[in-house]
Amino acid sequence: MADPLVSQPEEESIQKHESDPTYSEPIDESRNHDPGNTQLATGRQPQQPEISEPPSERASAREPSLCSPGHHNNNSPANENPNSTKKSCIEKVKSLTVTIIIIATGIVSLIVAVVVICLFTTVLKPQLYNFNATIGDVSESESTFLLQINSTISSATVTAINPDLELKADIYQSTSKPPEYIEVLDTVTIHELSEKNRFRYNYFTNPDNPVYLTPGSSLLYDVSISSNSGSTCPARLYLFNNQTTYFLFISDRNSKIDSTDRSPCLFPDNGAWSFNITDSSAYYVAIAIDTGVSVLGNVTVERIQYNTTGLQLDTQLTSGNPSHTITTCDTGSGFLCTGIDDTYLILLINEGSLINFQLKTFFVYNRQKVALSCFSLILLLVFVVVFTLFLIAIIIKAVGIYKKHNTTIDDAHISLISPAQQTNTETSGEQVIGE
């Protein structure tokens, strides 16, 4: 019986081909379910079937990573291109890497800039300090001067101003303070003075010269006072370390001149006084006497000297070589001096001379100021770097945990799908292909 589904023209074609011995029956490609040929014949684009993977394979394929999707979309198209996903992953990794590198580079550059600023500003901008000191007097004994150069000083320049032809000043250096000894000068009696006025009352009275004293020295005055009046202040002593101020005080008895130090009022029953010296200098003394008062005094000098025995001679200043620079720290091509100790500079001079000292300092050597400030700033920046990297690590870890959590939920959802549902999904996919 003929197949009613076959039309009449088709039956005639079948009978014609059956009578032809060279005819071979074409292969029914639709029975082989070749979707590609079927779709080409119908003019439609090929469509790839959706292949269902076992849950274990899906879980392994979606291991949490920095660039994996945080939430699986069951409605996503089955023909998603894995190459595009991989490319997106690489782009994310590159972007994060570049961001971290930029942040780290910026912080490191900031630290380097701060270090350079701390070093260069202190090295290129030294501070200079100048002071003059009159060292020595007309006494036959040699006088000593001690200058302590602390760790803030990089160099010291010693210069004799208008040196005498007979000048000889030996310069010594020591890492420890040299020992001291007391030199007692002969007691000098100052002739009697009377009437209301101001008078010179120096140890060296003829000519009028100061006496050079160092810290710890003393000027001892024992003044005998006789008074026929009821003065409330019969006599008073004044100490000066400046010649100009001293001369102004002497020349004008009504002037109010500030002295370096002064004694209390001296009376007939109490005319002794001692000036204790705290700074190395040449000192002048004047006395003010009230009306109806006469004075007669004795002066003794106890002078502290520094023992230079055993010290290494650095140089000698003369009229032909009046200046010398002592370097305590030579930075050379570097910036810092480490392990700087105090240096003691000792001058042993044979006659009274005016000496200029110029001290050059680098802030970086001051361990209590700039050095600590730079160190604190650098330490703060290092802390910022560590904290930033720690924060980035926490963020990356948190993102990883979040993605891992979502992946676990997706895997649990996939494992709950029954095999029948998976088969129906595959069958529906085949039916779509057949159509």
Image (cartoon, grey):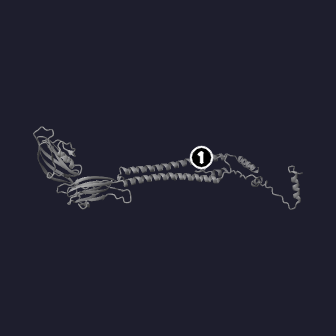
The answer to whether residue 275 is visible is no
- Seen at 54% across and 49% down, the residue is 396
Quick one: 312 or 94, which is closer to the camera?
A: 94
Image location (x, y in percent) of residue 273: 17, 45
Q: Is residue 220 left or right of residue 81?
A: left
With 104 as the anchor, is 203 left or right in this view? left
Q: Where's residue 58, x and y in %?
A: 65, 51
Count of marks placed on residues = 1
Which secondary structure lies at badge 1? helix
Q: Position of residue 246 (x, y in %)?
A: 19, 47
Q: Amino acid at mark 1?
A: His
Q: Circle 1: is it few (<14), some (14-19), or many (20+) Cα within 10 Å?
A: some
Q: Residue at x 46, y 53 (%)?
A: 109
Mark 1 — residue?
Answer: 405
Note whether residue 372 is visible: yes
Residue extending furthest toward the top: 230
Find residue 168 and report its horizontal and vertical position in percent: 22, 60
Q: Residue at x 87, y 49 (%)?
A: 4
Question: Looking at the image, which residue sits at the far left?
Answer: 228
| Side of 398 relative to 32 (left or right) | left
